[in-house]
Image: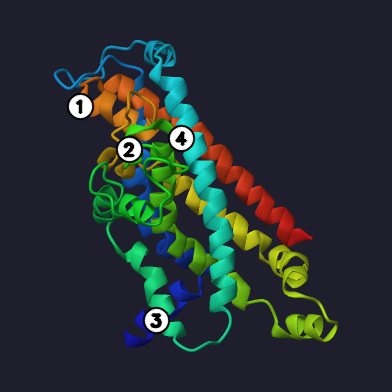
């Protein structure tokens, strides 16, 4: 009897197809429960007249919710702002992540301390980070404005004067810039870790040979490091874009989409419409507008990675 049970156990372990299915099953169930079902529910809601008071999806209205959302003045602004914030965050984050990975790839005194400082923003909750930035960029008590006044860059007779405050959250482009700065600050650690993993995988012999040949820092960076890191940079860009484009926490705590719709983003507008406004169907329609954009970004990134690795 013992030999039979042992034979059965060995037989199941040797069946790679069954073993692989069993190991993937928890991940598939997780994705289906937390991604697939909400996505199907969002589609059903967007095609109905569901509201907070009447959340049923039995009343089919077709594409009326999408047409209604497209004709609102807030939609083009929210879409434009989402693209601008995502693109700006992506560019700044990748540049700084590449620079930090170059720094951390070298040995220097106190390296462990800088590694801790770099990872702290990622370990901090998004809401707490946004509250900190809410104080840093306050319209009256901002320490940044105080420093600018002390060095005579802000105030009457200065290049950013005559006001004593910049009112970061009360102006369109300063508000968008503030959102970008917060996103870069909190996502830079993740991008740095991803890029650093690729940087440390480049053989040291290549850099030693370049040094012997007399290549300078920038020539090595743009001729060796960046081309070798291209697949990793694309992965970091994809993660950054997906996280920023679908995030509403920063704008909800800081600008709240104002002034007017000047800093409105699609995720936050979907929340305002669907939850605070009570129009579940229209909120779901706005949220679904983000899906083809995010899908296109993911497919483009994966295609670029495949091409880079196949060279």
Give neighbour class at mark 1: few <14, some 14-19, many 20+ (Cα, 10 Å): few
Circles 4 and 1: CB atoms closer than 8 Å: no
Residue at 82 percent across and 86 percent down: it is 212
How many angstroms separate mark 2 from mark 4 (CA)? Answer: 16 Å
Say which label, 1 or 3, has the lower sequence index.
3
State which quarter of the image contains the N terminus: bottom left
Residue at 38 percent across and 51 percent down: it is 182
Q: Which mark is residue 113?
A: 3
Give neighbour class at mark 4: few <14, some 14-19, many 20+ (Cα, 10 Å): many
Query: Which of 246/152 is in front?
Result: 152
Classify residue 298 as left or right of residue 174.
right
Image position of 64 with respect to 260: above or below: above
Q: Which mark is residue 276?
A: 1
Instruction: Give the label, 2 or 1, closer to the camera.
Output: 2
Q: Secondary structure at mark 2?
A: helix
Residue 41 visible, this angle: no
Spot the residue most to the right: 213
Q: Report x, y in % for residue 282.
A: 32, 20
How many angstroms separate mark 1 from mark 3 (CA)? Answer: 44 Å
Classify residue 139 as left or right of residue 109.
left
Instruction: Give the label, 2 or 4, closer to the camera.
Output: 2
How many angstroms separate mark 2 from mark 3 (CA)? Answer: 33 Å
Circles 2 and 4: CB atoms closer than 8 Å: no
Spot the residue most to the left: 53
Instruction: Give the label, 4 or 3, closer to the camera.
Output: 3
How many angstroms separate mark 4 from mark 1 (CA)? Answer: 20 Å
Instruction: Give the label, 1 or 3, closer to the camera.
Output: 3
State which quarter of the image contains the C terminus: bottom right
Q: Which mark is residue 82?
A: 4
Q: Which mark is residue 169?
A: 2
Q: Secondary structure at mark 1?
A: helix
Q: Report x, y in % for residue 260.
A: 33, 23
């Amino acid at each position: 009897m013992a030999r039979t049970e042992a034979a059965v156990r060995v037989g199941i372990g040797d069946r790679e197809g069954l073993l692989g299915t069993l190991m993937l099953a928890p991940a598939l169930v997780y994705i289906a429960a937390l991604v697939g079902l909400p996505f199907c529910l969002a589609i059903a809601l967007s095609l109905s007249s569901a509201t907070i008071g009447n959340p049923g999806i039995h009343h089919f209205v077709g594409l009326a919710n999408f047409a209604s959302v497209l004709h609102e003045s807030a939609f083009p602004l929210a879409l434009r702002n989402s693209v601008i914030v995502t693109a700006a965050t992506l560019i700044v984050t990748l540049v700084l992540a590449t620079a930090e990975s170059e720094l951390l790839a070298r040995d220097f005194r106190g390296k462990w301390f800088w590694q801790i400082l770099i990872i702290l923003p990622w370990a901090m909750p998004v809401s707490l980070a946004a509250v900190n930035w809410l104080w840093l960029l306050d319209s009256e008590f901002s320490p940044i404005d105080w420093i600018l006044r002390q060095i005579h860059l802000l105030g009457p007779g200065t290049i950013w004067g005559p006001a004593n405050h910049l009112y970061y959250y009360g102006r369109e482009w300063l508000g968008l810039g503030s959102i970008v700065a917060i996103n870069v600050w909190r996502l830079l650690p993740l991008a740095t870790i991803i890029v650093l993993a690729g940087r440390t995988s480049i053989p040291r012999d290549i850099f030693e040979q370049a040094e012997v040949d007399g290549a300078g820092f920038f020539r090595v960076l743009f001729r060796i490091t960046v081309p070798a890191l291209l697949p990793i940079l694309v992965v970091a860009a994809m993660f950054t874009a997906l996280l920023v484009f679908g995030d509403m926490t920063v704008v909800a705590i800081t600008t709240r989409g104002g002034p007017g719709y000047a800093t409105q983003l699609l995720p936050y507008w979907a929340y305002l419409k669907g939850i605070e406004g009570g129009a579940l169907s229209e909120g779901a329609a706005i949220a679904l507008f983000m899906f083809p954009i995010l899908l296109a970004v993911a497919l483009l990134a994966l295609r670029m990675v495949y091409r880079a690795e196949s060279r």
